[in-house]
Image (cartoon, rainbow, N blue to C red):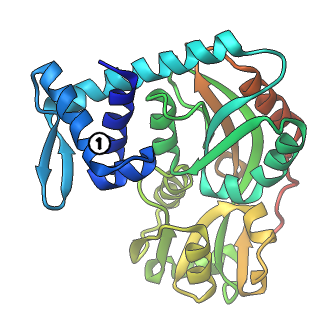
Amino acid sequence: MEMRQLRIFCAVADQGSFTAAAETQHCVQSNVTMRVRELETELGQALFLRSRGGVALTAAGRTFLGYARRILQLADESRTVLSDSDTPRGLLRLGAMETTAAIRLPAVLMTYRQRHPEVQLSLVTGTTAELIRGVLERRLDAAFVGGFHPMPELQQEQVFEEELVLVSNSRFETLKALKRAMSGQSILVFKTGCFYRSTFERWLERAGLVPQQVLELGTLDGILSCVAAGMGVTLLPRTVIERRQDRRALRYHALPNDIARVATVLLRRQDTPETAALRCMVEIARDQRLVPAPATS
């Protein structure tokens, strides 16, 4: 069993396609197919179900994927630890919520890049649930997520504080007016697993409000554009709204502190050695910590 085989196997599992995996591994599809077949022969198990639409993991493949990722992570960690020094270098894989990536991280990443040019940064966005899973599965070195989570295998530290506000079209001048109209409004949110969505749903339930429908959108810009057009309401950090060019079409409404004040947390695995690259990222994130003044809607 070779590391190359494991990397190709994980790439196929992630991409759901031999062709797409070949592109990510910078090789031809026939090489990917051959490496996977070699691995299946060695293990005596079919790892993928093949079809015209792509491939899917078998039960054995799902089990083996966890081990393959652990083996690759340990190999990467061993190289990193043995070569690590006081000078940050190598690949640092970060995850972040889309709002954090758009508003908070540009300054952090710019400072990091200026101080540590030898580090290759990788940033992916996703819901809090997806990012936590990425860290647990060792696909991410660290992630910026919403709130603290009762998981002893994770090391968690607050790096930002956000104030969440209810965001509507500008025609709703007060929160009271918006509440009265909520039964005719759609709530515009990211997919399930988003921390802000679950917070919004908790507030609606506590307030005894039932919206007309829930609309899932894939991007922050899409959500805010639809709110500005009057399609519905959302719940987002106030800093996101204040930096919008079209903010005149939007109005935000302050909420009680127990709902509004939330932590953005940087988390990583407890059992993973902290490299110089990650340690410096944590330090810069701490230095850039911002706590906004309360909204006065």
Q: Quadrant of residue 281?
A: top right
Quarter of the rendering occupied by the N terminus: top left
Disc 1 marks which residue? Answer: 32
Is 248 on the left-hand or right-hand side of 44?
Answer: right
**What residue is shown at x 61% (from left), y 57% (from top)?**
98
Q: Position of residue 36 (x, y in %)?
A: 23, 35
Most foreground residue, 3 or 72: 3
Q: Position of residue 252 (x, y in %)?
A: 72, 72
Count of numbered circles in the view: 1
Most foreground residue, 180 or 274: 274
Is 255 on the left-hand or right-hand side of 50?
Answer: right
Is 78 on the left-hand or right-hand side of 170?
Answer: left
**What residue is shown at x 52% (from left), y 31% (from top)?**
135
Most foreground residue, 38 or 194: 38
Q: Quadrant of residue 5?
A: top left
**What residue is shown at x 42% (from left), y 73% (from top)?**
215
**What residue is shown at x 56% (from left), y 76% (from top)?**
222
Above or below, comparing residue 76 to residue 233 in the picture: above
At label 1, counting other C-alpha atoms closer than 10 Å, the crowd grade (few under 14, some 14-19, many 20 or more) is many
Quarter of the rendering occupied by the C terminus: bottom right
Q: Is residue 28 visible?
A: yes
Please name the amino acid that badge 1 sits on.
Answer: Val
Above or below, comparing residue 192 to residue 269 in the picture: below
Q: Position of residue 216 (x, y in %)?
A: 43, 68
Q: Quadrant of residue 213?
A: bottom left
Q: Position of residue 280 (x, y in %)?
A: 81, 28
Q: Is residue 17 visible?
A: no
Is 164 on the left-hand or right-hand side of 55?
Answer: right
Above or below, comparing residue 266 to residue 214 in the picture: above
